[in-house]
């Protein structure tokens, strides 16, 4: 896989480290051996800005081909937690590409506004991974958080987004997405993980979405965690909290969601299940 232009990548590393703290510094190998690398890869349409996107890439040792996961960040943007997620996916036997949609465009938070282009970025990452010999193109999932979860749902919606992609995701895992007004007709199996007390995304809206008729579409599994709030899986939050929005780590919910995600990916991508040893 090809890394991006050194100047652009170095500038983005510096910008991320300025806001992300030590966790991502270690993940990117600043002052320690790194698990992955910050790369640059072609956008879905190289004729428009940006022609290339930035992402954090990890992959297991060995020739593969491996299943893979595209990771999409929330509305504040990329921070160290997403590098840690990619590293964890690597330990489970997956190639992982965490896409930095906002940093690639040098723009700030999109909280309250959304970012439709992120779904197109997911397709760009899917295409990039599909062309790599170490990746099994038929076994690529998308994993999104908050705004990224909304974008992940868009990529598997049977109502095509514009532009559409010839490559398709095999599965989707979405943490606390905005389900209001969404169709339950999806092209690939979906796992939704959300807290019952989330006042940013609505668990009730996700229940309504899943209750819709979806004959002819893939299955949707919804897990709602009592007492859990938005961002319940992130132990450390390095971005500003929103007024009136409750963000809180919930260890029990985070651990259960992680186990359910791992089992779901193992079923649909053929990776390691929770009772199997992890890759080194």
Image (cartoon, rainbow, N blue to C red):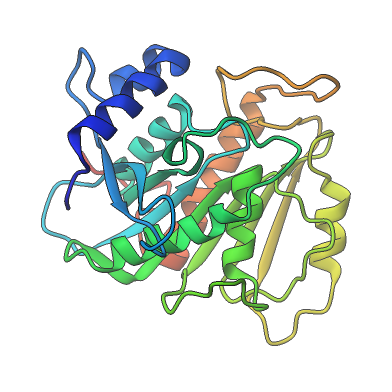
* Apparent side of residue 280 relative to residue 124 in the rendered image (left or right): left
204 over 267 or under it: above or below: above
**84 sits left or right of 277 in the view:** right
Q: Residue furthest bottom?
A: 216
Residue located 59% across and 72% down the image: 162
How many marks overall?
Answer: 0
Locate residue 273 relative to residue 239 in the image: left or right: left
Q: Residue at left 38%, top 63%? A: 47
Q: Would you say residue 147 is visible in this rendering?
A: yes
Q: Does residue 25 appear left or right of residue 253 in this picture?
A: left
The residue positioned 29% from the left and 52% from the top of the image is 41
Q: Is residue 278 visible?
A: no
Occupied quadrant, residue 111: top right
Most extreme residue toward the left is: 63
Q: Quadrant of residue 219?
A: bottom right
Q: Position of residue 37 (x, y in %)?
A: 24, 36
In x, y percent, where is residue 124?
Answer: 40, 61
Q: Residue at x 48, y 32 (%)?
A: 78
Q: Split into 4 quadrants, where in the image is the C terminus? A: top left
Taking 239 as reference, is 51 above or below it? Answer: below
* Residue 223 position within the rendered picture, expressed as x and y whole percent measured from the top left: 71, 50
Rendered view: 81 above or below 269: above
User: Residue 133, percent across and down?
Assistant: 16, 66
Q: Nearer the viewer, residue 18 or 226?
A: 18
């Amino acid at each position: 896989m090809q890394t991006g232009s050194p100047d652009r990548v170095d500038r983005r590393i510096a910008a991320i480290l300025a806001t992300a703290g030590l966790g991502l510094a270690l993940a990117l190998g600043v002052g320690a051996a790194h698990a992955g690398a910050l790369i640059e890869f072609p956008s879905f349409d190289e004729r428009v800005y940006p022609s290339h996107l930035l992402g954090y890439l990890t992959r297991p040792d060995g020739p593969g081909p491996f299943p893979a996961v595209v990771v999409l960040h929330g509305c504040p943007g990329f921070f160290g937690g997403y590098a840690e997620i990619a590293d964890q996916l690597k330990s489970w036997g997956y190639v992982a590409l965490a896409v930095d949609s906002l940093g690639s465009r040098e723009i700030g938070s999109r909280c309250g506004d959304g970012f439709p282009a992120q779904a197109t970025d997911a397709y760009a990452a899917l295409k990039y991974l599909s062309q790599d010999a170490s990746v099994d193109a038929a076994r690529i999932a998308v994993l999104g958080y908050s705004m990224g979860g909304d974008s992940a749902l868009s990529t598997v919606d049977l109502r095509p987004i514009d532009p559409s992609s010839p490559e398709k995701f095999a599965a989707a895992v979405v943490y606390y997405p905005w389900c209001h007004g969404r169709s339950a007709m999806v092209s690939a199996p979906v796992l939704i993980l959300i807290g019952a007390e989330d006042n940013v995304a609505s668990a009730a809206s996700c229940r309504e979405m899943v209750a819709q008729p979806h004959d002819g579409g893939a299955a949707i599994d919804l897990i709602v965690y009592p007492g859990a709030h938005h961002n319940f899986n992130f132990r450390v939050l390095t971005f500003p909290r929103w007024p009136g929005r409750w963000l809180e780590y919930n260890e029990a919910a985070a651990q259960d969601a992680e186990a359910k995600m791992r089992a779901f990916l193992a079923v649909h991508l053929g990776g390691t299940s929770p009772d199997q040893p992890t890759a080194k």
